[in-house]
Structure formats: structure tokens, C-alpha cells
Image: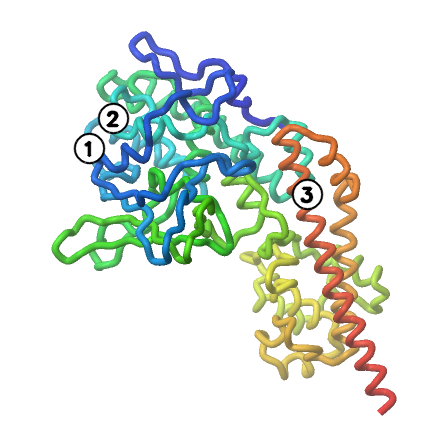
Amino acid sequence: MSSLINPTTTKTLITSATFRRQLTTSSAVTQRLVSNPPDLIKWVKTQGGFVHPFVKIADSGPPYGLGLVAHQDIPKGSDLIALPEHVPLKFPDGGDGSHQNLVNLARNVPEELWAMKLGLKLLQERAKTGSFWWPYISNLPETYTVPIFFPGEDIQNLQYAPLLHQVNKRCRFLLDFEKEVTRQVGELKLQDHPFGGADVDASSLGWAMSAVSSRAFRLHGKALQNGNRGDVPMMLPLIDMCNHSFNPNAEIVQEQSSSDPKMLVKVVAGTNIKEREHMTLNYGCLGNDFFLLDYGFVVPSNPYECIELKYDGGLFDAASMAAGVSNPSFSSPAPWQKQILSKLNLEGEQALLKVTLGGPKIVEGRLLAALRALLANDSETVQKHDLNKLKSLSNEAPLGLANETATLRTLIALCVIALNHFPTKMMDDEALLEKGVSTSTELALQFRIQKKSVIIDVMRDLTKRVKLLSSNESLASQN
């Protein structure tokens, strides 16, 4: 498994006889792109923006780095930051030849990697001498802790196939996209060259994509013909230094007055912010796969953490037999059971076979309904119930105590199988963490510890439910 060259050790990525700003990072360890960047708060103010006088930039410590902190108490409802329309960095919707060539390049970017599209604009501005956004760009981190820049060993250390697949997919895309960029811009005149005549390689493309994925917001853009506003990714100088929290103390607000068609992007205090408290936004109710892949950090005890499995009849047969459940029919469901699987989108050519354990629902509804139906004795019992009822774990034993016990025991066995797919034990991972390791190794260890923790938590929850069902069954038999 290969990864991109770590940008802290790579050679100069862009060289040109008429271009001197490197689109790479130096070997020196600095927190920002340049050692003494311009004052970002001052720049925002000079561009007509607003910054609350009690908001300062400070080091948030690992894993977040620089962030915004209050140096005095700030009341709830206070405007913290406001940016006029021209300050956010967006992908161009028109312009000169270099913009058009940037648009042509962006057509090669798949929608799921939308961050690369805006990343092209970021690279263009980084390459441009005297760029309007240079005071902002120079304050960006020199490196990112996302897995595409992990050493190969630490990519393997993630130990989780779905994330490994995504990391490899992004690495392959960047390597292929480097060739496409070289092909498209190689023969362009200097005035039409989107990067000022400089060469761009996979590592600089990876830096730009990581900068956008970890900092950009998808907000309302210009009004469309139907009166709605399009969803536009944009980088918000200073605002993007707010760190993540599932219980944030600030929120983003977009304002537009009837007299002024220009959009104002603001951050408002959602709670009373105390002195020395960091300002936080909710990046989304996401699992650690997304946080690590796009943002470069892992959230401990993440309530939205889950594990991804592939719905596979053979796997579930093995789990049910391991649980001591007789007559499993996952590999050869009856015709009426296949109809239910089709309704759950787990059967057929367009089936979505990815199912999850963990998160707020504990067990994904489609998986739970499928297990209940496939472990049922007859179709009439199942078809009496709405599928939504069969999808809910809060509906206790809709098909009877025996069916529910078999379903939960099969799920517990499935958790055991999933846990055994990890080559190391959680206690071994925790011991390695205590020894002191590199940042990428630490993130890989934290990630796989959280994955194992969520499996164990699901097992504990389901085991409690089985015990409760057993006590209910015992009580019913006594009565």
C-alpha cells in the first residue's frame, strides 16, 4: 500500500524561472505556511470584516493546533466574526483564460472529492504573486494530519478496510490527477496558465485538497433561477479556525438585507463564552472515518461512531451458528424473505449492501429488520408488522421473544467476528500509545481503538437486552 510523499520531507514541488513561491512545505517544522505570516485578524478588519475585540488567535494544542479563544467573557448572541462577500475563497464562476482552464481541470474531479475542485483555486491563489488571499493562505497549516500523508506503515495501522479503501482511492486519484493537470496545462501560454507557469504534483494537490476538506464550509451561494440558493463550498478566513465540538458555543449565520444583495457570513456566540474558552462549531454529526479522512483528527467517545459491514449471507450464517441459533437462512432465504430484503434494499442489482453497527441507533434499521425477518418462522407473522417497526430496536420483540433473542445473539456474534478481524487487541494499542509515538501513528492507534470500543459498546448493549428478554421469558413462563 502506497501513500503520497509526506510534504515535510518532499522536494520542491513547483519550480519555474519566473516563479519563486513554492507550492510545497519546507523541511523546517513550522505551524503555518510561512514563519511570520500577516496578522489575519487585522487583514479581515481591513477588508471590511468584523472581529469581536475579545477574540484572539491562540494555540489549542493537539490535535487542533491554532484556534480562536476569548480573552474576556463574551455574552450569548454576540457577533464574533463577520465576513463581507468578497472575503471567502470560492471556486470561480467566470473570468479570464486562466480561470477557464481551472474550470476545465475541475471537470476531472468527481463530486465526492469536491474539496479538490476548490483546492485548485487555492493552489492558483497560492501561486499568484500579490494574491488578494495571500494573507489568509500564508496562515494555513504547513502540513495536514490526514491519512493520505501517513507513512505506508501507519496507513496499515488503521486496520479498518473501509477507511483503507478510501485512503487508497484518494491517493490513486491524486497521482492520476497530477498526470491530467500536466497534460492539460503543459502547452498553455503563461498568461493562460492557471498556476502561473509552475508545475503542480500530487503532493501539492494533496495539500490543497486537505486544506479545503479540513477547513471549507458548504454554504448558500448566489440565488439560482428558481429562487433557491446553491450549495457552495467556500473557505472562510478566520472563521475556519473555530475548532469542532458536538456541543458548540458558536454557530454560522448567513445574512442578506433587502437593500444589500451581498451576502454576509457571520459567526455568532450560541452560548455565553467564558474567558480562555475556545470557540467551537459543529462540523457535523459524523463518525471518525470522516473526521480522520477529511480533518485529520479522531474524536474520543464519538456518539456517532460506527463500524461498516457488508451484508453477506455466508457471514450472517456463520454468526448465527456461532450464536447457537438453529436453521439460519441467510444464504438461502425463502421467496417471501427475498421480497423483504428487496424492500430493505439488501437484495437485487441496485442493492446497498453496506450496513452499520454503532451510532445513536446501535444497529442500523435495515440490518435489524433483515435479521428479524430471516430468523422468523413464517411470512404471516412478519407481514403483520410494518417494516419501520421491524427496523427499530426500541420496539422490543415485535416477532416474539424467541425471534428477538436469536436476532440479538446473532448480532453479538457478528460483533465478535468483526472484533477478531483486527489483528491487535485494544489493550495492546493502548500500551503502544503510552510509549509515545509519532503523530500519524498516534492517530492510527486512536482510530482503531475507537472502532474496537464501539464494537464492544454494541456488544454490551445487546447483551443487556438479551438478559432482559431472558428474565421476561422466565417471568412469563412462571405466570
Q: CA distance from mark 1 to mark 2?
A: 8 Å
Question: Residue at position x 60%, y 42% from top?
Answer: 163
Query: Is tag 1's residue or tag 3's residue first in the polypeptide sequence?
Result: 1
Question: Residue at position x 74%, y 51% from top?
Answer: 418
Question: Residue at position x 38%, y 39% from top?
Answer: 56
Q: Amino acid at mark 2?
A: Ser
Q: State whether residue 265 appears in this view.
A: yes
381 or 470, which lies in front? 470
The image shows residue 273, relative to residue 14, as above or below, that is: below
Q: CA distance from mark 2 to mark 3?
A: 44 Å
- Circle 1 residue: 95
- Circle 2 residue: 98
Q: Secondary structure at mark 1?
A: loop
Q: Which quarter of the picture shows residue 361?
A: bottom right
- Circle 3 residue: 448
Q: Residues within 10 Å of mark 3 (few under 14, many from 20)?
A: many
Residue furthest to the top: 17
Question: Residue at position x 57%, y 58% from top?
Answer: 351
Q: Amino acid at mark 1?
A: Gly
**Residue 224: mark:** none
Q: CA distance from mark 1 to mark 3?
A: 46 Å
